[in-house]
Image (spheres, rainbow, N blue to C red):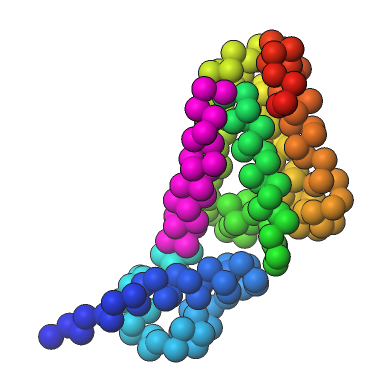
Amino acid sequence: MTRRPAPGTRRRILKTAARLFGEQGARAVGMQEVVAETGLGKSALYREFTGKDDLVAAWVRELDAETWSRMDHELAPYEDDPARRLLMVVELAQDGVRAPGFHGCTFYNTSAEFRDPAHPGRQEAVAHLDRLRRRLRALAEAAHATDADALADMLMLIISGLYANAATLGPTGPAARATAAARTLIDQHIPHRRRGSPDL
């Protein structure tokens, strides 16, 4: 008879993996280290995840869901102001890099660590970034930007630059100017917003 895992086993493994992957990078952490840190047997780990690739993908997928949930919650009060929502996406990213122990964006880090396009962790990371780009484009269109594609892509570049700079030079380096740069771009592409809402 197959032994059923104890309640909360999967959550325990994912929580431990998230800490280890965040601190050391997903590629550097072996499954044995996850086993040792969780205090679970190897069989318990492999009942929940088929292997390292599966665990990495689940970790990225969970963070993806958490990220969108938080973003949707923060943007909800500004449903009728897509230009403000555009800026808030960058503000949320800037808040994230100020968190203690920030080691870079999980999605960009994972896509860089696992370069095989078929790797499930990379696929989850790229899917998240693609969704972010599409979200920015949809907000830019809703705000009647003069060039929604260009605005969305330039904001993506600001966000990626924000993460890279904060991970290497700290959140008080060039990364500290991310929101101001985004505001300038939004003003340029949504001129009626600049005139009507100076609080952007």
**Does residue 58 appear anywhere in the picture?**
yes
**Residue at coordinates 54% horizontally, 30% vertically from top-left?**
78
- 87, 141: nearer the viewer: 87
Tell me where residue 14 appears, x and y as whole percent. Answer: 45, 70
Q: Residue at x 75, y 37 (%)?
A: 179
Where is residue 87 drawn, in percent x and y? 66, 32
Residue at the location (66% across, 46% down)? Answer: 93
Principal secondary structure, stretch drawn in magenta: helix
Within the image, what quadrant is residue 45 found in?
Answer: bottom left
Q: Is residue 98 left or right of residue 169?
A: left
**Quarter of the image holding residue 194?**
top right
Q: Position of residue 168 (x, y in %)?
A: 81, 58
Looking at the rendering, in which quadrant would you find the N terminus? Answer: bottom left
Residue 57 visible in the shown view: no
**Which one is in front, 130 or 192?**
192
Q: Which residues are magenta?
A: 57-81
